[in-house]
Amino acid sequence: MRIERVPLPGIGTRLRFATTSGTWVGVIQHTDGHRELLVYAASDSDTVQTSVRLTEQEAHELSEILYSHHNGEE
């Protein structure tokens, strides 16, 4: 998998990659610490279909969820 890294002067850095199904997913790491989770339109990999603004803590929590190995316990 290749991650594209693009500096956004005055804003931060955009990172994105294509999933195996062809959907592009990205994150903008803003210089003030917040993150934007991006999902691109299926028909145009340059058009953001939806975005979600996350605080640093929310981004950390999301990474924990994505990385965790669910063992069935609640």
Image (spheres, rainbow, N blue to C red):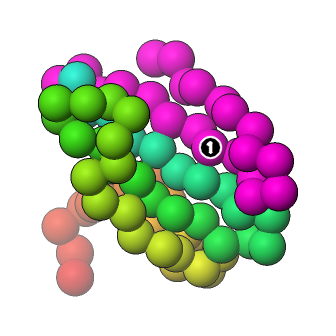
User: On the rendered structure, is 34 left or right of 58?
Assistant: right
Residue found at x 39% / y 34%: 46
Where residue 50 appears, x then y in whole percent? 29, 60
Amino acid type at circle 1 is Arg
Q: Is residue 53 above or below residue 31?
A: below
Q: Is residue 50 at least partly visible in the picture?
A: yes
Q: Nearer the viewer, residue 39 or 67?
A: 39
Q: Residue furthest top?
A: 1
Q: Quadrant of residue 19?
A: top left
- Quadrant assignment for the C terminus: bottom left
Residue found at x 44% / y 29%: 17
- The residue range painted magenta reads 1-21
Q: Which residue is mark 1?
A: 14
Q: Residues within 10 Å of mark 1 (few under 14, many from 20)?
A: many
Q: Is residue 14 magenta?
A: yes
Where residue 3 appears, x then y in whole percent? 55, 25
Q: Is residue 25 above or below residue 66?
A: above
Residue found at x 62% / y 43%: 14
Q: Is residue 30 above or below residue 32?
A: above
Q: Nearer the viewer, residue 24 or 59?
A: 24
Q: Secondary structure at mark 1?
A: strand
Q: Is residue 64 at least partly visible in the picture?
A: no
Q: Is residue 8 magenta?
A: yes
Q: Quadrant of residue 24?
A: top left
Number of numbered callouts drawn: 1
User: On the rendered structure, is 48 left or right of 35?
Assistant: left
Residue found at x 73% / y 45%: 8
Where residue 4 appears, x then y in whole percent? 58, 26
User: On the rendered structure, is 62 left or right of 30?
Assistant: left
